[in-house]
Image: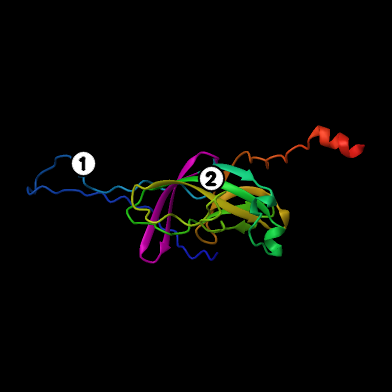
Amino acid sequence: MLRTAVLTSALALVLTACSGADDDTGPTPEPSPATPVVEASTPPGTELSFGDPATLVWQPTADLAGQLELSVDAVAEQRQSVFDGWLRDDAMAASRPYFVTVTLTNTGEGDLAGQPVPLYLRDETGRLGAPWTLGGDFTACQSGPLPTPFAAGATDEMCLVYLVPDRGRIRDLVFEPTEGYDPISWTGEVAAPEKRPARDEAGKKGRRG
């Protein structure tokens, strides 16, 4: 996935009022209640734990500014068998799958419908991988971009699919909208794949005989 988004700064617009009298030395009026105030974004380089929220600001397109509150809630390694019935190329078959659960709230003013969030899985070698979009039929984890619509105030919990090449392992999840940006990262305990069903003891004895 090409990361063409450009990071923007969150700006708080504060309105001040002036009195008609030239000699008025009274206190500066408070901002109007109708004044839109944007939350300060989480500073670049912040290190968070799974479950911690961050306010992310970036520019998905030239005419759209994005602002999200996002938390990485859980990360679970999967077995390749989770893709049984799906077409897989050699690279996909040689990868290590992870399901990542995130909670997102649109804290900005624009509709972010269908926009990809620049949240990447970073493996132990430092490589970044974007989430895969597998389509609505993959009910185990319906990975993809933000839902449509996703207007101001909307909240959603999403499951994202990441594939680490060459059976590599996860280091962390990072928000990195542009190259050279000091990423915001999340780390925590990664759930192991579910154990394979144990074979029936009687069946094993029967095979020995």
Task: Tell me the quadrant of the picture where the C terminus can be found.
Answer: top right
Q: What's the amino acid at mark 1?
A: Glu
Q: Is residue 30 left or right of residue 196?
A: left
Q: Write down the residue under mark 1.
A: 30
Instruction: Identify the element where label 1 is drawn.
Output: loop
Q: What's the amino acid at mark 2?
A: Thr
Across and down, in percent, residue 66 comes to 39, 56
Kindly check if marks 1 and 2 are in contact, taking CB atoms under 8 A apart as contact: no
Nearer to me, 179 or 167: 167
Residue 67 is covered by the magenta coloring? yes
Residue 118 is covered by the magenta coloring? no
Furthest-right residue in this view:
209
Mark 2: few/some/many CA within 10 Å (<14, 14-19, 20+): many
Dot 1 or dot 2, earlier in sequence: 1
Nearer to me, 35 or 74: 74
Q: Write down the residue under mark 2.
A: 101
The boundaries of the magenta stretch are: 49-71
Marker count (numbered): 2
The Cα–Cα distance between marks 1 and 2, rounded to whole angstroms, is 41 Å
Q: Which colour scheme is used?
A: rainbow
